[in-house]
Amino acid sequence: MVKKESVPPAMQETGFYNAFVLPKDKKLRDSVYAAFSKKYNERERYAILALNRLDSKNKWNSDTLVVPAKIDTTLMAYSPFPMQLDVLSNVKKFVIFSYPIQAYGVYSNGSLVKWGPTSMGKKTAQTTRGLTFANWKKKLSISTVSSEWKLPYNFNIFNTGGIGWHQYDLPGYPASHSCLRLLKNDAQWLYSYADTWILNPGGATTKAKGTAVMVFGDYKWGHRKPWRNLLDDPNANNISVEEMNKLIEPHIEKIIKEQENREKVADSIKAAKAVEIQEPAVKPQVLAP
């Protein structure tokens, strides 16, 4: 007689974060996920999957989901990034991507306004690290690697390499061809939030850079997924103020300089347009001799 696999206890209570275990057997997984869907509403499921660096399409790409004991659908209660960074107090917009924990954070004048999951470059096609600036954006781009890859809300940050952030599959690990994948809602939000570059007439050279963006750190390939460590320590993924300061301080002068230049260029363009509008539309009449 073959012993049938029994359904394991779906939720293992461990404290601030709990483990929602998914069995290998597909039928059992369907049963457990049905219970999961019944227990949590759509927004709560979205938040839980986001914490596990997953989208709904890839919800089965895990044998265990890390689930907060208390669900905050904004995700802000679980932020690995510091809520306030004084070093950025004079920087209006700043976006940072962490390779080690596959997450991005957004700061406005030093205050964290948003964070979320990402899937960055895989081991053989890693995303370029360092400080860069947002360039151009397009609501729907087609990848130059494969015409089958549609990239909604694409925002380029490394123009020569064609690297940018956009909506695409989040499978729960770094899987991209160097780009920074986002959930659709996050890609839409960042598409509206960040500033593009300003080009000189003709587009040959850059007159002003866009929003400052930083990519940092290394992913521990082959190790336990970092968000799984939250089951043992709810602060396991936290990035300290000191670490963030160490990353940002060497670049703060350049970031502010580029921000001031962009504001100056944008103001001059605005002023020029205002003059054009004020000029009389009717040509002066010339009396016949």
Image (cartoon, rainbow, N blue to C red):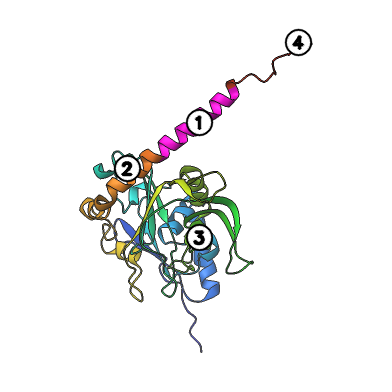
- Where disc 1 sits, the SS reads helix
Label 3: few (<14), some or many (≥20) within 10 Å? many
In 3D space, how far apart are the residues under numbered discs 1 and 4 (Cα atoms)? 36 Å
Among the two numbered marks 1 and 4 on one chain, the one whose residue lies closer to the N terminus: 1
Label disc, if present, on residue 256 of the rendered structure:
2
Asked if residue 145 lies in the magenta stretch, the reply is: no
Which residue corresponds to the image point at 64% horizontal and 66% vertical from the top-left?
A: 147
Which residue corresponds to the image point at 47% horizontal and 69% vertical from the top-left?
A: 175
Query: What's the amino acid at mark 4?
Result: Leu
Label 4: few (<14), some or many (≥20) within 10 Å? few
Among the two numbered marks 3 and 4 on one chain, the one whose residue lies closer to the N terminus: 3
Label 4, on which residue?
287
Which residue corresponds to the image point at 33% horizontal and 66% vertical from the top-left?
A: 226
Q: Is residue 250 left or right of residue 102?
A: left
Label 3, on which residue?
55
Among the two numbered marks 1 and 3 on one chain, the one whose residue lies closer to the N terminus: 3
Label 2: few (<14), some or many (≥20) within 10 Å? some
In the rendered image, is residue 82 in sight? no
Snapshot quadrant of residue 224: bottom left
Label 1, on which residue?
270
